[in-house]
Each structure stands twice: as structure tokens, then as C-alpha cells.
Amino acid sequence: MFSSVPLSFDTLLNRLLASVRLRVSNGDFTERGLARLIGISQPHLHHILKGMRLLTPEIGDALMATLAMSLMDLIDEAALGQALLDRQCLPGSYQHLPLLDGCLGPGSPFPDWRAVAQWIQAPSAAWDHARRPALVRCNPDPDAGLPLRVTRFALIDQDETARLTPAARSWYALRWRGAGYIRQIRRESGSIFVLGQISFEPSELPSVIELDGNSVLHVIRARIVWLGPDPRSADPFAHPGGWLPAPAACS
């Protein structure tokens, strides 16, 4: 991993050159073969790698395409994470929310919280009561009420405190047999009571989930903060009726 230093174009160029030198020294490419692939002479490439000639943007792009690299491969992960945290702390600013890969709903594997499909810019004030926010796509759920049948996206809070003490008026993302469900719940001792299912047929999600000694966090994976349309559209968080009440403890 690169050391965390202030990011500049010069830093990116030096990291790209270091990566190219490493690939050549490891035998992945020869200078002659790599020069031929990017359309320059071997002496020209040699001088670039030795620092005797400048690396132009055109040659840099050609090198990255040949090595199947992107600018993200040149960015220090620690510096990128710190930059995102710094932006989150700015008053009245926008934060980049992760849109998780996968879908929340019956018929789909439960989304992997570590797999981010895209980062979306959203106003911080819209969800400042969520401690660990993320966005996720939703599948239609025939066993839920009408809003959940047509909802396409949800803003969730993965904070453990909100999951350990579920509130009566809130909605939660539950994981059951590999799939996800959005439901209101009631927790009693070693059981989770699932509320509001309306199907006349037996639901894939039982009305009572016995924890059998497992942590409630194994089933309650997130609190639902907002339901609405595609968050990449204009002013998605202004969608009327989309906001769900926060528990009193998070107010």
C-alpha cells in the first residue's frame, strides 16, 4: 500500500512509473514489448522510466490501458478514506453515500455491505440521524404493504445500537435464509415478531423468528431511514412520504 501523502498530479505520475518499473522488473513485460504495445520506441520508454524524459498524459493513458489500471489503483486507500471522512464533517456539505451491490428483497441474495456498486453524492442534512448510512436497491415484496411493493431504493442505517434496540414505529431490514425483507418488528426475549405481513399464502418470512441463542444482529441487519425512487435522480430525498420516523434514541 502507498504511504499517505498529499495527492497531486506529480504523485500520481510517480506512482504510475513505480508500477510500470515493478511490472518490468517482475518480468511481466519487457521494455521493448511494452513500448511496442503503447506505440513508442524502446529508448523513449527507457528514458521515461529512468526519469530522463517526461511522462506525457497520452503515454500515461496508454500505459494504464495496457496494464489494465485506473486512477483509483494509484490512490492511497487511507488518503481516500480520510478525504471522504473530512468531507462528511463539513457543515451543510454533501456526503458520498455507498450504493450497495445487490438488492434487498425476496428472491435475491442479501446485499453484501462490503460490496459498493457506486458512490452517490447526497446532502448530509437529509439523513444526519443515521450513523452508518448506505443506499440499497429493493425488490418488490408481495407480502408487504403497498409502499414496499413499489419501492425501488432504501436508505439504511447499519448502526448496531439502532439494531439492538428496535423501535416500535421503525422499519428494519431483516435477513432470513439468505434473502432480505423490510418489516416492522417487535423483540421479546429470544424472539423477533414480524409485523404487518399481508399474504394469504404462507410467507417465506415467518411471523416469529426464534433467535436460538444467536445475536439479534444476525437477523436485524439495518434500520430503514428512507424509501423512494432512484437516488441518482434530481432531489430524490424530497420524495413526499418517503421518510420513515427515527427511533427516539436517535433523535
Image (cartoon, rainbow, N blue to C red):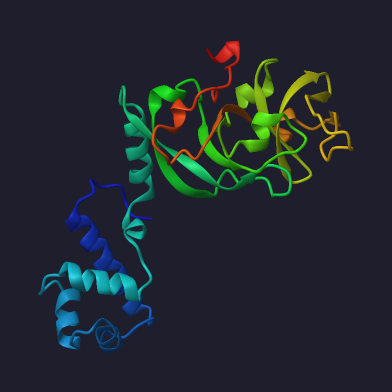
- Is residue 224 left or right of 98 when viewed as pictured? right
Q: Of residues 151 and 1, which is closer to you in this image?
A: 151
The residue at 31%/70% (across/down) is 64
- Is residue 213 left or right of 24 when viewed as pictured? right
Quarter residue 246 falls in: top right
Quarter residue 177 falls in: top right
- The image quadrant where one finds the N terminus is bottom left
Q: Of residues 184 and 19, which is closer to you in this image?
A: 184
Return the x and y of residue 74 as percentages of the image width and height. Answer: 32, 58
Quarter residue 173 falls in: top right
Q: Of residues 23 and 138, which is closer to you in this image?
A: 138
On the question of residue 111 being in view, the answer is no
Q: Is residue 54 above or below residue 155?
A: below
Q: How many marks?
A: 0
Q: Is residue 95 above or below residue 112?
A: above
Q: Is residue 26 above or below residue 219?
A: below
Return the x and y of residue 207 as percentages of the image width and height. Answer: 85, 29
- Is residue 135 left or right of 33 when viewed as pictured? right
On the question of residue 6 being in view, the answer is yes
Return the x and y of residue 81 as percentages of the image width and height. Answer: 38, 42
Return the x and y of residue 40 as percentages of the image width and height. Answer: 19, 84
The residue at 55%/22% (across/down) is 241
The residue at 84%/24% (across/down) is 191
